[in-house]
Image (cartoon, rainbow, N blue to C red):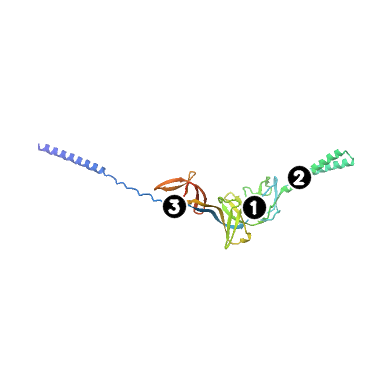
Amino acid sequence: MELLKRIVCAVLCAALLVLSGCAEKKKKDEIAVPILEAKSVQYKTTKAEVRDISQKYEQPGFYGYPYSKSVKFAANGQIKSIEVDSPSEVTKGQLLCTLYTDEVEEEIEKEQIRLDRVKSTVDTLLERDADADEIRMAQYDVEIEQMHYDKLVKSLEDYAVYAPCDGEFSMEAGRYPYNVNSRVNKGAVFGNTLDRSEKYLCVQIFDNKLSNVNFGTTVSLVQGVQTSTGTVTDIVFNDNGDFSTYMYVITPDDKDALTDLGDITVVFDVYSRLDTVVIPKKAVKELGGRTFVYLLIDGVKVEQDIETGIEDKSDIEVVSGLSGGEDIIMN
């Protein structure tokens, strides 16, 4: 009997221990993790201003030779001789290259025989006091054959290539350079001659042209203490395969104000806008064909599509989308 009591007590104690452990585990599982509230986002903003803006580009200028002339073959044929090295200084009219003329000379000899024959026919008709109409027809034949003969003789000039101007000649760079006996086609470029007949004030821009700069754009010119104005009179584009250049040719209003010595600053005065909306260029976003800015309205970040206009070094004009005074988010 005593043993039975002890067993029952042991079982009750074990049950109490199990229930106590479950209650403790449930209590631990119910511990809540504290929620941290995020701080509000701080935006750096600036105001959209209504003021004047001018689009200007300041570039170094120099006196150089912006023009070159292509030297092309005027006939199909085969090179007989190349008279100059590449590159080399040449003068206008200097012989650069010749082509074989054997076939043309053979045609000239044949045409000479035909011309002599029709001339002889006219002489014979005149000696025989032939009919006037018959003599006139024979004289027409002489005129026709003479035209053919003169045309063939003149075509010999097409088999010689001459320098189009004074300057530096360079043979056309290509996979297969021209040599003696090379076959050539009419219109193919033999080389280029940099025209050194006159220097021009130039500004050279690589790859991307200056936006809104065209013929007639006015410029300000500064060389030391000397100042002047001028106009863009030409834009020469060159592409050598590796990169492209835009050469802006400037004609100063007073050519005596500047010299070929010393640095020259050229300021392109493209456009000026008065009383227009202006914002920093850094605030403008472009994505998926859209142009927009972020506005801060009552603490909320909002996208706003805009249309831009002219720009200067740091700011840009907003043509539509803003009216001025808006808070523009910069970060």
Q: Position of residue 108 (x, y in %)?
A: 77, 45
The reply to whether residue 249 is visible in this rendering is no
At mark 2, the secondary structure is: helix
Asked where in the image residue 267 lies, by quadrant, the reply is bottom right
Mark 3 → mark 2, Cα distance in angstroms: 77 Å
Mark 2: give few (<14), some (14-19) or many (20+) Cα within 10 Å. few
Mark 3 → mark 1, Cα distance in angstroms: 50 Å
The reply to whether residue 118 is visible in this rendering is yes
Q: Earlier in the sequence, mark 1 or mark 2?
A: 1
Q: Earlier in the sequence, mark 3 or mark 1?
A: 3
At mark 3, the secondary structure is: strand
Location of mark 3 (residue): 46
Left or right? Give the position of 251 relative to 325.
right
Location of mark 1 (residue): 68
Between marks 3 and 2 in the image, the one whose residue lies nearer the viewer: 3
Question: Which one is nearer the viewer's eye here, 158 or 299?
Answer: 299
Q: Are marks 3 and 1 in contact (CB under 8 Å)?
A: no
Mark 3: give few (<14), some (14-19) or many (20+) Cα within 10 Å. some
Q: Earlier in the sequence, mark 3 or mark 2?
A: 3
Residue 151 tag number? 2
> What residue type is disc 2 on?
Lys
Left or right? Give the position of 8 relative to 179.
left
Q: Residue at x 50, y 52 (%)?
A: 275
Q: Position of residue 230 (x, y in %)?
A: 60, 56
Question: Which one is nearer the viewer's eye here, 319 or 228?
Answer: 319
